[in-house]
Amino acid sequence: MTSRVIHSIDFERPGRQAGYLRVPQSRNLSGWGTVEVPIAVIARGKGPTVLITGGVHGDEYDGQVAVSRLLHTLQPDRVQGRVILMPAVDLPACLAMTRLCPYDARDLNRVFPGNPDGTFTERLAHFIDTEILPLVDVSLDLHTGGSSMDFVPSTNMHFLDDPERMQRALDAAAAFGAPYNVVFWGVDESSTLTSAVERRGIVSLGTELGGYARVSVEGVAVGERGAANILKRFGVIEGEPDAAGNDGTPRTRHMQVRDSSAFSFAPAPGLFEPRHRVGDTVQAGELAGYLHFVEDVERAPLEVRYQRSGILWATQGPGRPQKGDTVAVVMEPLEHAA
């Protein structure tokens, strides 16, 4: 079905274009209203198309900063191919500093492939899936843990059945140069942008650059360097990826989160006290943290323990999880990593 999103971007035109995707959004004071989602296209000559996105979740800021800076600094004479930049994909959520879009209370990253006749996020997801992704060879989607989690800076990708596609994604992650790359199973992944990209056979790489709803100095730096490295890796700009650590050796460690046993969940609503920082080595059965019930003077804290040994990839952010919320995720070395 045809998208209802309006725009004046010519994706085939060389040079630099900056404008908006106008997503229809009727509201009380604007019956014919639209939401203007920023987009830029920078193109020259023949070469691959790289899509770089930030702000798919509005409370994740490092990617928004990194993509916005690239949008203002990358010039067409440096490009061989095409770069599509979207620094604030779910703009209403970005302005509201929330994970869910305030217009429909939906998570944009859980509605792909979308619906042209659906809610705001569904219409936007449908446009991205049907109008942008068919143009794309490589997708880099910059995330953090937002308000709900804190992550060690990392790239991430899914397990892929095709060994060649899997290796291309692993190589892209190594070029990005984050401290870790996590090949992961997620709780709810089938409707994400990553899955939409992968269904088209496109190289897909995500990130988790920090979290706790802050702009992280390290997260922005990792995101900026990594985005430039991806453009270099695929020949869109000149140069070799700068993917080494401080000691000059290759930086990225390939890790995995294979199943739900890597997750620790809150057994009750309460105030969570973590016992480790992200990046710490932890053991199965070790104490992940306590759930405190400060409103109930007689109730003792509950222990939450790790189910797997490895390195703590993520820990819970806001302090008060609900029953069933993730409070910790443990990663381990990837089997058969290149």
Image (tube, rainbow, N blue to C red):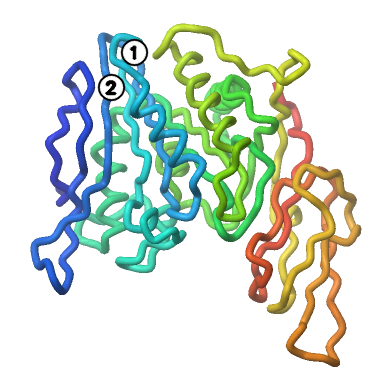
Residues packed near mark 1 inside 10 Å, few (<14), some (14 to 19) or many (20 plus): many
Q: What element carries label 2?
A: strand
Q: In this view, does 88 lie above or below 321?
A: above
Asked whether 3 or 208 is in front, the reply is: 208
Q: Residue 79 carries which label?
A: 1
Furthest-left residue in view? Answer: 32
Residue annotated with mark 2: 42
Asked whether 308 or 51 is in front, the reply is: 51
Q: Which residue is drawn at 57% across and 35% down?
A: 160
175 sits to left or right of 250? left
Q: In this view, does 134 lie above or below 77?
A: below
Q: Residue at x 84, y 88 (%)?
A: 299
Residues packed near mark 2 inside 10 Å, few (<14), some (14 to 19) or many (20 plus): many
Quarter of the image where one finds residue 27: bottom left
26 sits to left or right of 289? left
Q: Do the residues labelled 2 and 1 touch (CB within 8 Å)?
A: yes
Q: Position of residue 25 (x, y in %)?
A: 19, 61
Q: Where is residue 115 in the image (x, y as percent from the top left)?
A: 26, 56
Q: How far apart are marks 2 and 1 (CA)?
A: 7 Å
Three-letter code for the amino acid on which mark 2 is drawn: Ile
122 sits to left or right of 318? left
Quadrant containing the C terminus is top right
Q: Position of residue 86 (x, y in %)?
A: 34, 38
Q: Which residue is drawn at 15% across and 74% down?
A: 28
Q: Position of residue 249 (x, y in %)?
A: 75, 15
Q: In this view, does 254 lie above or below 294?
A: above
Asked whether 147 or 84 is in front, the reply is: 147
Three-letter code for the amino acid on which mark 1 is drawn: Val
Q: Is mark 1 on a helix, strand or loop?
A: loop
